[in-house]
Image (cartoon, helix red, strand yellow):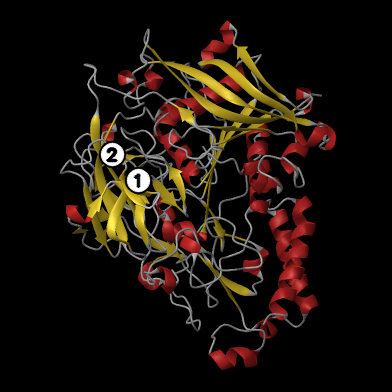
């Protein structure tokens, strides 16, 4: 078995339209769909032979029975406050893009799991606006007839534009409130007098989290340390408070912490506090499962498709990995919900998606969200055993038992090997795809340093992921639709020394560039006796031995030796790394910036590199002329097209990119 990138005419306007389901549709557990707006995309623009598209937004209403075995894994479902007649209701926001003439579509639906409630996939793949308000880019998804749906799954997604899950809270059978401990942490890039309890990620709230339930409880603790592994130092309770400055005055607050003297950049602050009334967050898995079944089996649904591919990036790729691990690809009737899964830059992670007091936004960064249930065993799709704990299992174990294994693409960039323990997904499995030289998200082009929390010592890697995405979607559709196998896997390996322990990492001595002294590890964690059942009672957790850290080995230029290589790596003008250290101005300059790689251009001539002592050959020493370079670059592009990593229609744009990059490097400062 292969599952692979790991193998084995409507006018614009607003309305409120309630679509009820016939008895046959009730099997999918979608009770009704409320359509709030239905708008012609780009004023009825035609996309190839498919024609015009429409954008539909609204809310989907679900109901799940507590007695169905496929719902048993939803933590606190039986304690939901709205349990009635053996069922629990909930709802989720959605946005759908569908051909106005359904018969002209290709029958495949891309189900986006939005990152912290934000839609992104159409903009990423096609260019243009995320909401297609004024710019549709080149319309690749739409020209090819895909239906695209973004569905809310995260109960705490913050912001007015976020797509959310609306799930009930839980109480004890006696009616008593459920309480517990919650934890958060962060490293700032500037001094702040107070911080939010919600997950602060890149300067914004990714998850609104829970308010403090008992401000004076002695279990509320604030500590500080200098790195992930450093000793926590408790801050005296008299030095901080749950408070927020309003109108120049400090006021009590259930959602902020004020520290006398302020929080300083470059240090990890961690807080533990008492919370109450947990949301039944695991219903996010049920929303994805049941909506996928609904669009395939409800004949009069708001959208319909023969095939559904779950797509997730970063947090949402981890969501899909956990979705598979926890057995949610079998719907309540035992049918496969997702036919394919595209989980991108998830590394070895899952996440806090189906726990009591779940914190879906928490991830695992070099200096924040440390020791959360993110990078936890098991890591690979194939069964594996942990020799230390004695645990065994695999991501697809339940899907195999349910006969609902989808086609799976796991794709990671260079960053995930340094920041998300990506090696663990394939060191004991059979394959993986590694997109060499890319960082977690595409950086600015031309290359530039990040800002704020993303300010690193080097410019970010500008290598684009867009072209890979288009090919991945096309390859997935061909695999599911007609059985056409995807490209062979490409990933660093232990047996040929392209995947190595950190001490063996042979990065060249590039002048002015400091190499990292560590990479993020996955740890054996213990959150208390019932944490495997979804109840985390010990905060912070007990931390056991880490799993082995392995990173991709590099060549003499510092570029990684294996993986899927864009022309910029195969015919380089620079070094592209999977890491970037924090700028001294934001503190902790020996720590890595979250999500970023580095761009380190070669010297133009031997004379230039001689002045700095750069060991990497200059551009002029590598290539006889601009024409020589572009000829090699063209061959590298053609190889990617032949191998189906890049679509033939994207070849001209990549060639233009190569010309521009040469001109930028050779006319540099």
Q: For residue 567, which numbered disc appears in the image?
A: none
Q: Secondary structure at mark 2?
A: loop
Q: Is residue 601 above or below residue 493?
A: below
Residue under the image location 54 percent in, 37 percent down: 160
Q: How many marks?
A: 2
Does 265 sit left or right of 577 as displayed? Answer: left
Q: Is residue 618 above or below residue 200?
A: below
- Label 2 packing within 10 angstroms: few (<14), some (14-19), many (20+): many
Q: According to the image, label 1 marks what residue?
A: 197
Q: Quadrant of residue 623?
A: bottom right
Q: Quadrant of residue 47?
A: top right
Estimate the spatial distance between the alpha carbons at disc 2 and disc 1, rounded to whole Å. Answer: 9 Å
Residue 338 shows up from this direction? yes
- In x, y percent, where is residue 661? 71, 70
Q: For residue 212, which numbered disc appears in the image?
A: 2
Query: Nearest the camera: 482 or 534?
Result: 534
- In x, y percent, where is residue 510? 50, 81
Residue 305 shows up from this direction? no
Does 263 sit left or right of 610 as displayed? Answer: left
Residue under the image location 32 percent in, 63 percent down: 267
Residues marked 2 and 1 touching at CB (< 8 Å): yes
């Amino acid at each position: 078995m292969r599952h692979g990138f790991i193998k084995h005419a409507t006018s614009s306007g607003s309305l409120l339209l309630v679509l009820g389901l016939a008895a046959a549709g009730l099997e999918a557990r979608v009770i009704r769909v409320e359509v709030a707006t239905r708008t012609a995309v780009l004023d009825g623009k035609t996309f190839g032979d498919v024609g015009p598209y429409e954008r539909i937004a609204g809310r989907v209403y679900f109901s799940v029975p507590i007695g169905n075995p496929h719902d048993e894994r939803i933590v606190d479902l039986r304690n939901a406050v709205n349990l009635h007649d053996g069922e629990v209701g909930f709802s989720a926001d959605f946005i759908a893009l569908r051909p106005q003439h359904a018969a002209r579509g290709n029958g495949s639906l891309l189900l986006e799991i939005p990152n912290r409630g934000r839609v992104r996939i159409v903009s990423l793949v096609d260019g243009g606006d995320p909401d297609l308000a004024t710019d549709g880019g080149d319309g690749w998804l739409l020209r090819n007839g895909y239906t695209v749906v973004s569905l809310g799954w995260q109960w705490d997604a913050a912001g007015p534009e976020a797509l959310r899950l609306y799930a009930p809270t839980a109480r004890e059978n006696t009616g008593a409130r459920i309480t517990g401990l919650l934890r958060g942490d962060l490293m700032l890039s500037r001094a702040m007098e107070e911080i939010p309890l919600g997950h602060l990620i890149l300067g914004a709230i990714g998850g609104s989290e829970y308010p403090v339930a008992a401000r004076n409880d002695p279990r509320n603790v604030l500590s500080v340390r200098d790195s992930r592994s450093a000793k926590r130092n408790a801050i005296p309770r008299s030095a901080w408070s749950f408070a927020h400055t309003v109108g120049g005055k400090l006021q009590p607050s259930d959602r902020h912490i004020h520290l006398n003297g302020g929080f300083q950049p470059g240090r990890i602050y961690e807080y533990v506090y008492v919370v109450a009334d947990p949301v039944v967050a695991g219903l996010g898995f049920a929303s994805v499962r049941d909506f996928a079944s609904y669009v395939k089996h409800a004949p009069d649904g708001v959208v319909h498709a023969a095939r559904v591919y779950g797509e997730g990036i970063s947090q949402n790729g981890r969501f899909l990995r956990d979705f598979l691990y926890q057995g949610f690809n079998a719907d309540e009737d035992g049918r496969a919900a997702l036919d394919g899964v595209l989980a991108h830059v998830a590394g070895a992670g899952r996440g806090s998606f189906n726990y009591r007091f779940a914190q879906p936004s928490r991830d695992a960064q070099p200096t924040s969200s440390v020791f959360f249930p993110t990078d936890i065993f098991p890591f690979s799709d194939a069964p594996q055993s942990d020799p230390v704990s004695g645990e065994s299992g695999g991501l697809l174990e339940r899907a195999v038992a349910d006969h609902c294994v989808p086609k799976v693409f796991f794709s990671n960039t260079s960053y995930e090997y340094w920041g998300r323990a990506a090696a663990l997904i394939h060191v004991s499995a059979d394959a993986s795809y590694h997109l060499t030289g890319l960082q977690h998200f595409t950086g600015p082009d031309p290359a530039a340093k990040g800002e704020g929390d993303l300010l690193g010592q080097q410019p970010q890697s500008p290598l684009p992921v867009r072209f890979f995405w288009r090919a991945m979607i096309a390859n997935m559709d061909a695999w599911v639709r007609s059985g056409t196998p995807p490209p062979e896997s490409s990933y660093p390996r232990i047996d040929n020394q392209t995947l190595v322990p950190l001490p063996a990492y042979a990065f060249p001595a590039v002048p002015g560039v400091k190499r990292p002294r560590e990479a993020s590890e996955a740890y054996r964690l213990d959150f208390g006796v019932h944490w495997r059942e979804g109840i985390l009672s010990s905060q912070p957790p007990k931390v056991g031995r880490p799993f082995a850290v392995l990173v991709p080995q590099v060549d003499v230029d510092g570029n990684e030796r294996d993986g899927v290589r864009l022309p910029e790596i195969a015919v380089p003008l620079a070094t592209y790394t999977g890491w970037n250290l924090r700028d001294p101005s934001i503190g902790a300059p020996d720590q890595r910036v979250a999500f970023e790689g580095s761009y380190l251009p070669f010297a133009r001539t031997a004379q230039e590199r001689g002045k700095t002592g750069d060991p990497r050959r200059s551009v002029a020493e590598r290539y006889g002329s601009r024409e020589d370079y572009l000829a090699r670059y063209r061959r590298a592009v053609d190889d990617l097209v032949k191998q189906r990593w890049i679509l033939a229609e994207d070849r001209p744009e990549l060639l233009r990119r190569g010309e521009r990059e040469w001109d930028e490097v050779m006319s540099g400062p």
